[in-house]
Structure formats: structure tokens, C-alpha cells
Image (spheres, rainbow, N blue to C red):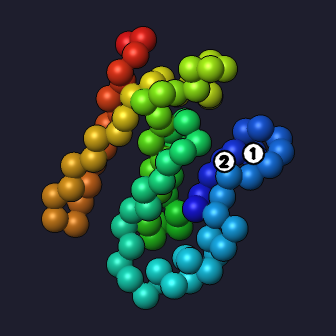
Amino acid sequence: MICTYSQLNGEGSRTVANAFEVFIILEAYNLKLVLQGHIHWKEYGDVNDRFQFLTGGSIAGNGWKGRRHNTKEGFVKIKVESEDFSWNMLITVGR
């Protein structure tokens, strides 16, 4: 939904083609967090003080080419308590 791929790589995109329309649909809800993945690096951000997004890296990393943007191989652990959440990246390789 949200991704810095084109800014970091100077070309291409890794976003959902109709992300704008999806966010319009979600405006009617108390959206707190968008979880996403598959780009093999960790991203985290706050969008207009409205919701946050989190992209968890990858357990496989990018082992066939090397790390992407220095994201170590691992996974994200998310703790949800009522309306709040916290997260941390658990590294599985090359601590």
C-alpha cells in the first residue's frame, strides 16, 4: 500500500495500483496500522497522524543478492494491547 521503493531505487514501484481507492474506503474506519510485506526490507511510518504502516523484512532476506537497504533477515513480532501496539524485529541470521 505504501512503499519507498521508487525513492530508494530511482525507478519502479512496489505499491498497490489502487491504494488510493483502498484508503478512501478505509477512511470510514478507525484504522490504526497497515501491515504489509514482500519487499524484503523493513519500513515503518506514520501517515498524517492518522495511521501507521509497517513492512516486515523477510526471513529469507535477499540472500541471493545480499541485504536490501541493510535489513537483516528476520521477522516482526507485534504486540497488541487494546488500542495500542508495539513491535520489534527479531533477527534470525547474522546477529
Relative to 76, 38 lies left or right: right
Q: Quadrant of residue 75?
A: top left
C-alpha gap between disc 1 and disc 2: 5 Å
Q: Residue at x 50, y 48 (%)?
A: 37
Q: Which residue is drawn at 21% across and 56% down?
A: 80
- What amino acid does circle 1 point to? Gln
Q: Which mark is residue 23?
A: none
Q: How many marks?
A: 2
Q: Tell me if residue 48 can be seen.
A: yes
Q: Are marks 1 and 2 in contact (CB under 8 Å)?
A: yes
Q: In which quarter of the image is residue 40?
A: top right
- What amino acid does circle 2 point to? Thr
The quarter of the rendered structure image containing the N terminus is bottom right
Q: Depth check: give the residue in front, 39 or 24.
A: 39
Name the residue tied to disc 1.
Answer: 7
Position of residue 89 measured from the top left corner of the image (x, y, whole percent): 36, 33
76 shown above or below 16: above
Q: Which residue is drawn at 80% across and 49% down?
A: 12
Q: Which residue is drawn at 62% across and 52% down?
A: 3
Name the residue tied to disc 2.
Answer: 4
Mark 2 lies on a secondary structure that is: loop
